[in-house]
Image (cartoon, rainbow, N blue to C red):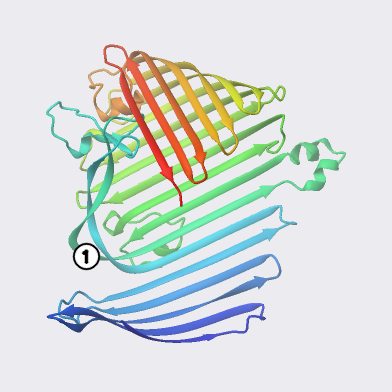
Amino acid sequence: YEEYKGTVKSNDSLKVKFYADYAYRTDYEVYQSEFAVNSISQTMQTGGGGTLKKNHEINVLMTYRNLKNDVGPTPLPNENNVTGRIDWNMSMFKRHIRSEVTMTTSTGRELKQQYVFQAVGSGLGNYVWVDTNGDGIQQLNEFVEKKLNAPTEYIKVFLPTDQYIKAYSNTYNHRLDITAPRAWKESKSLVKKIGSRLSNISLWTVNKKITSEDFANRFLPFNQNIAESDLLSLQQVIRSTFFYNRSNPVYGVEGSILLNNSKTFLNQGFEKKDQHEWNVAARYNASSYAALRLTGTNGLKSTFSDFLATRNYEISYLQLKPEISFQPKNTVRFSILGGCTFKRNVFEGGSGEKVELYDGGFELKLNKLSQRNITSTIKYIRIDADFKDTPLSSPLGYEMLDALLPGNNFTWNISWQEKLANGLQFSFSYEGRKSDGSKAVHIGRMQLSALF
């Protein structure tokens, strides 16, 4: 390729800096034993930023690229791409409130997509195949997100089609940290002393890919009322965690809210997944050797597809998890685990399937800093299920039963990582499970790594 580029930029000593550049590039390819022009591109880029009023830092970057692909022996459609990025960091009230905002946007052509599932080794995939109808043929509606490792696992692979569409991609990331004034700790007011132990971390992420040119739909993250005909994909994650005594080594409480919504348009149709969860956790360290932790969770998880109707469900769940830990040495930790989980399918038109899970077990951790890490867990899980006429092998059954079966279940695993020498590491993992009326499943992996 040949490229000509010119740049103009401000002095580095200025509080507010800026720059701009222009590039003209010609790419070549081999055609009939000679070099021929393949494409011609023109790229213009500008950016700037600096610190304003000591508490605000803003940086902006914009890029425009014109690509001519119809000049070569194998012509393709021309492209015009626009990308931009804004970073805004802010602090207020002596840094007790800190905000970080990042927005990006881009314009270009997208290929319509469809997906298939590709088999991979145990522990490497995110999905498993559940033969719902027992015909031995893999179908899209029979792949579900894995709960436990399986002998054969799958990953979702997106395949492009031959249909191009113009798309606008935008992301919005916002992190907000709030802590109570440090001076409140020395206050005589009881309210201020209690308030000094409060803090919050909130995260908001929005990823949109649409075909609509409407300004509000493209750039306003809270505007998500987008027509299905204009939507390619939309994902929103909101997580907010409130802490009481976050840094206290003796006791503390935290409560969190999670909202995770996603919708994707594929060549086959729409697929939508939602998860709403409320979580409360309390910890108490009775001494340097013993600790207690109690976690409660209430949530709603749903999936809906207009082309995989058999995978549609909406599960309401309530979970309680106590844990007692003992650490007689810095290298040894022993935990007693327990808990109960109640699930119900509340999907409109469903049969109201119910599942109750009760579990108890032990966990042992052996750790030698920078040399060895061994973790082993044994659990007993009792499952009572009322599935009406729904098969246990259905995607709903797999999700609600956590890949186990009604009755008595046992799970066990061990993970061992060892540093043998400088740059040489050994890792071993083994996982097993046994359910009533089925054979035990054993899955093991071993790996030796050499870093040069």
Vertical arrangement, residue 247 with respect to residue 219, above or below = above
**Total numbered circles:** 1
* Residue position for label 1: 164
Vertical arrangement, residue 325 with respect to residue 167, above or below = above
Amino acid at pointer 1: Tyr
Vertical arrangement, residue 447 with respect to residue 366, above or below = below
Q: At x 71% / y 22%, what residue is drawn?
A: 286
As helix, strand or loop, the secondary structure at mark 1 comes to strand
**Is 346 positioned to the left or the right of 202 in the image?**
left
Q: Position of residue 341 (x, y in %)?
A: 45, 21
Q: Position of residue 289 (x, y in %)?
A: 68, 22
Q: At x 56% / y 36%, what residue is drawn?
A: 371
In front here: 318 or 404? 404
Q: Position of residue 198 (x, y in %)?
A: 70, 40
Vertical arrangement, residue 292 with respect to residue 242, above or below = above
Disc 1 residue crowd, few under 14, some 14–19, many 20+, Cα 10 Å: few
Q: Where is residue 141 in the image (x, y as percent from the top left)?
A: 21, 37
Can residue 312 be seen by looking at this rendering? no
> Quadrant where the N terminus lies?
bottom left
In front here: 11 or 308? 11
In front here: 52 or 224? 52
Q: At x 23% / y 30%, what residue is drawn?
A: 130
**Is 238 positioned to the left or the right of 165 in the image?**
right
Residue 224 image-quadrant placement: bottom left
Residue 39 image-quadrant placement: bottom left
Q: At x 85% / y 38%, what residue is drawn?
A: 189
